[in-house]
Image (cartoon, rainbow, N blue to C red):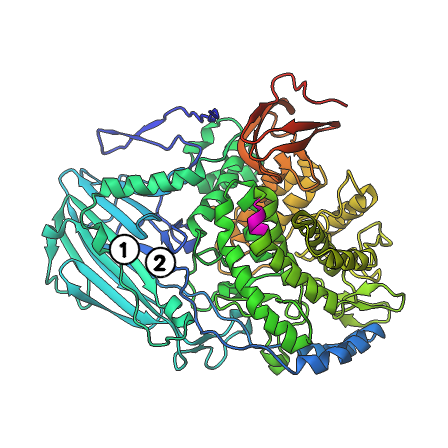
């Protein structure tokens, strides 16, 4: 029986000046606390069950709950493939191989297809409370250990409290409102949306809204343009339902309002239940006039609020409690989170904020990605804009992949499922893109996709300048996404999954790469056009470009894909001839190269500018998430990667900082990784602006600030912290590979290692004091701690205690 890490806190109380009862401030390290309502959206609390997303503002006079449903997108399935690309490709390659990079640009633009679609806001639930909005005490909290948010305030002798959660077992959002004291609950509940639709009251105690998504929404980066949002094209339907579950006797049927609403008067307790559905599945199947599916509220009639809450908490904690992380208790837990961020940024110590950052990433994944759903987009499942930043879609040249970096190592493997399912869909459509656009076998995907799984390079066929080739024309996503299929097997060792799903995906991506590769003048396999997302270069003769030959990232992704594919085929004992072909190509790939500044070159030529501070550090893919570079296996290349990081600098967007935590962890430099954690926790004031260079940090509600909000930075940070404490990508379990000196003592329980292992680790004064290994498969396990290495024969379903003397290690 695994021992659980217990987190204790001392209770603090505050006596409100006009009240007689004490109010307890939050004392749990897993509670996020504010002492005022949310102003901007980025200060509201996120809730979700993988499908329904909610942002809770906690306002006193007029509460807003912004709502999303994971499948509510603009557009419809369409063919974005471009037969003309096949003729343009050899022209582009001829120019690139001749070093005429600017001449290649118009030919590359000719290979583009239509832009992808946008993830849309569903609506807003408004609770308009009657009377005075002043309060003598206020608090709102989000408990990430239970998935519950509460708003509590005192007014005129009455304590008002609202508790919300979004239930995965029952697929609804529930809200319990209470009034304790002389006052009562008097409010009007209404539903609105930025999408065209209409609300009505079909029966007593039920409010219904139905609308339709636009058939097209231009990406926001195209700026203001005519017909950016089009309702004259087919779009999916959506419905929202709000029902009074408890308190119907306090409904007022005619409150004199000019809009449909549920009006409650003189109540002491009210329970509201919200449901939302779209016609996505019917729409995907080709029925463009399908009705919105039923709400599913009928089954809740016989359930109590307490039982619904218990089911939610049990379901949520079954996932959340798998991992515990303790860096020691500190009294800052009872300080409002926005104040904690400011104090931390000014140099304060707050280890609880750092462990909270780690667990908040796991909270977001549990809330936004559940089996059977679709993968998290650029904003998870939370978005309030009709034309959100970068369409809030799937940017698959890093951001989508980064979203799922914590899934396996942080013991949430089944939540990886939506991405793995989406990769299967991409492979089907990507096979057609490979054939039509390039005359190639296998499957391909590019920089951008959406819920409909398009695989073409976006850019509107190069019209009006098209999409910039520094990001749009990047056919390497299939190779990177295939790594997720391999990693899901590597952690779980399910050979049936490898045979039936992962290997076919990997093989198809490798088949495309074999056809995509061409030989350069020295007979080496290279890619062309080759970009390094999303950077540019300048040649010594003055040419400015984004596409060249054999970018370092291209070569690293292909090396990684071929390595994983070969290993998978060996495990399955199949495809020997294909294995040999991959190994032959891999041995002759354009090599990783060290440049004039001692850096790992970003391009095949030594064009790197030491003043370049670009947010993408794509050429370090071989360091992370790849495994081609590591201080223990390739020390010279590791030093070159380190030099590249030093030249690029520590600043950048939020997600870029998250990636850099992982880079420094892989370089076994825990103190620099910790420096990046502190940098990523820099407080950012929400202003809606886009910063590409030095604006990254954290919003008041702990959402990652690109800025604007982009959720991948949260997941990059969580994965990076795990990487500091446990690594297993080199065929061994490396314990505490990059624990920083700032974390003198701590414990982590429940991290996963490749090979089918779960690991607990504790340390004091920077030294490991104990470790426990939980084994799922028999075999041999190689363990490393510092310079100590040992090989252990392990048995299935056994536990190995390595503490306290760690005698299992030997030199």
Task: Write the start and end of the magenta stretch as one range.
Answer: 494-498
Mark 2 and mark 1: span between their CA atoms?
A: 10 Å
Q: Give the left or right position of residue 218, taking residue 621 as reference.
A: left
Which quadrant of the figure has residue 19? top left
Which quadrant of the figure has residue 765? top right
| Residue annotated with mark 2 | 67
Q: Give the left or right position of residue 723, taking residue 38 as reference.
A: right
Q: Give the left or right position of residue 44, taking residue 651 as reference.
A: left
Point 63% across, 82% down: residue: 83
Q: Give the left or right position of residue 13, taking residue 808 as reference.
A: left
Which one is nearer the viewer's eye here, 346 or 697? Answer: 697
**Residue 744: image location, x then y, percent:** 61, 25
For residue 529, above or below residue 619: below
Which quadrant of the figure has residue 256? bottom left
Residue 122's tag is: none
* First reached walking from the N terminus: tag 2 or tag 1: 2
- Dominant SS in magenta: helix
Could you tell me which quadrant the C terminus lies in?
top right
* Circle 2 or circle 1, nearest the eye: 1
For residue 576, above or below residue 530: above
Circles 2 and 1: CB distance less than 8 Å? yes
**Residue 795: image location, x then y, percent:** 59, 29
Residue 274's tag is: 1
**Residue 805: image location, x then y, percent:** 65, 16
């Amino acid at each position: 029986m695994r021992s659980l890490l217990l987190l204790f806190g001392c209770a603090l109380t505050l006596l409100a000046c006009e009240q007689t009862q004490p109010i307890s401030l939050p004392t749990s390290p897993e509670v996020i606390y504010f002492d005022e309502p949310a102003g901007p959206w980025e200060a509201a609390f996120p809730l979700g069950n993988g499908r329904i997303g909610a942002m809770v503002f906690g306002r006193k006079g007029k509460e807003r709950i912004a709502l999303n449903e994971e499948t509510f997108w603009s557009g419809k399935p369409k063919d974005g493939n471009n037969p003309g690309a096949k003729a343009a490709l050899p022209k582009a390659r001829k120019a690139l191989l001749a070093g005429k990079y600017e001449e290649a640009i118009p030919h590359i633009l000719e290979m583009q297809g239509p832009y992808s679609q946008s993830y849309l806001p569903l609506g807003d639930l408004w609770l308009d409370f009657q009377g005075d909005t002043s309060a003598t005490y206020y608090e709102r909290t989000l408990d990430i250990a239970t998935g519950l948010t509460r708003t509590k305030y005192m007014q005129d002798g009455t304590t008002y409290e609202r508790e919300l959660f979004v239930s995965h077992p029952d697929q609804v959002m529930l809200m319990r409102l209470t009034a304790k004291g002389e006052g009562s609950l008097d409010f009007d509940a209404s539903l609105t949306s930025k999408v065209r639709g209409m609300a009505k009251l079909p029966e007593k105690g039920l409010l219904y809204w139905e609308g339709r998504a636009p058939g097209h929404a231009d990406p926001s980066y195209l700026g203001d343009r005519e017909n950016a949002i089009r309702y004259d094209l087919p779009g999916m339907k959506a419905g929202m339902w709000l029902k009074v579950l408890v308190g119907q006797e306090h409904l007022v049927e005619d409150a004199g309002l000019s809009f449909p609403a549920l009006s409650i008067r003189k109540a002491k307790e009210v329970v509201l239940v919200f449901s939302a559905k779209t016609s996505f599945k019917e729409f995907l199947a080709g029925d463009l006039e399908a009705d919105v599916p039923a709400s599913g509220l009928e089954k809740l009639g016989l359930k109590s609020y307490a039982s619904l809450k218990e089911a939610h908490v049990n379901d949520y904690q079954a996932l959340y409690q798998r991992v515990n992380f303790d860096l020691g208790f500190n009294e800052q837990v009872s300080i409002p989170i926005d104040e904690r961020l400011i104090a931390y940024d000014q140099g304060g110590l707050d280890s609880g904020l750092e462990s909270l950052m780690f667990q908040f990433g796991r909270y977001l994944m549990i809330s936004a990605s559940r089996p059977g759903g679709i993968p998290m987009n650029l904003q998870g499942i939370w978005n309030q804009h009709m034309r959100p930043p970068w369409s809030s879609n799937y940017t698959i040249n890093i951001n989508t992949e980064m979203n799922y970096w914590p899934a396996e190592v942080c013991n949430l493997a089944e939540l990886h499922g939506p991405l793995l399912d989406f990769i299967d869909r991409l492979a089907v459509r990507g096979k057609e893109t490979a054939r039509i656009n390039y005359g190639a076998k296998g499957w391909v995907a590019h920089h951008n996709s959406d819920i409909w799984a398009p695989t073409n390079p976006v850019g509107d066929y190069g019209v009006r300048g098209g999409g910039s080739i520094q990001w749009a024309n990047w056919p390497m996503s299939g190779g990177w996404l295939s790594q997720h299929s391999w990693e899901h097997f590597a952690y779980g060792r399910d050979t049936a999954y490898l045979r039936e799903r992962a290997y076919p995906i990997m093989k198809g991506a490798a088949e495309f790469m074999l056809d995509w590769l061409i030989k350069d003048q020295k007979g080496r396999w290279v890619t062309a056009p080759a970009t390094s997302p999303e950077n540019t270069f300048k040649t010594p003769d003055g040419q400015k470009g984004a596409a060249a030959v054999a970018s370092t990232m291209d070569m690293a992704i292909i090396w990684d894909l071929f390595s994983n594919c070969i290993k998978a085929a060996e495990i399955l004992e199949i495809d020997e001839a294909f294995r040999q072909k991959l190994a032959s190509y891999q041995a002759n790939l354009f090599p990783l190269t060290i440049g004039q500044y001692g850096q790992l070159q970003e391009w095949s030529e030594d064009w790197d500018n030491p003043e370049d501070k670009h947010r993408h550090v794509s050429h370090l893919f071989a360091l992370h998430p790849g495994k081609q570079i590591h201080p223990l296996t390739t020390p010279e290349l590791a030093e070159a990667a380190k030099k590249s990081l030093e030249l690029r600098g520590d600043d950048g967007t939020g997600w870029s900082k998250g990636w850099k935590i992982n880079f420094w962890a892989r370089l076994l430099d825990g103190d620099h990784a910790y420096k990046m954690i502190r940098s990523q926790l820099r407080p950012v004031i929400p202003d809606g602006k886009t910063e590409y260079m030095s604006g990254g940090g954290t919003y008041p509600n702990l959402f990652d600030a690109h800025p604007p909000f982009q959720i991948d930075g949260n997941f990059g940070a969580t994965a990076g912290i795990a990487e500091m404490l446990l690594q297993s990508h080199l065929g061994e379990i490396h314990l505490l590979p990059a624990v920083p000196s700032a974390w003198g003592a701590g414990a982590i329980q429940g991290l996963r290692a490749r090979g089918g292992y779960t690991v607990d680790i504790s340390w004091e004064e920077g030294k490991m004091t104990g470790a426990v290994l939980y084994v799922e498969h028999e075999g041999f396990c190689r363990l490393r701690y510092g310079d100590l290495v040992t090989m252990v024969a392990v048995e299935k379903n056994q536990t190995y205690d390595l503490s306290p003397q760690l005698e299992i290690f030997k030199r």
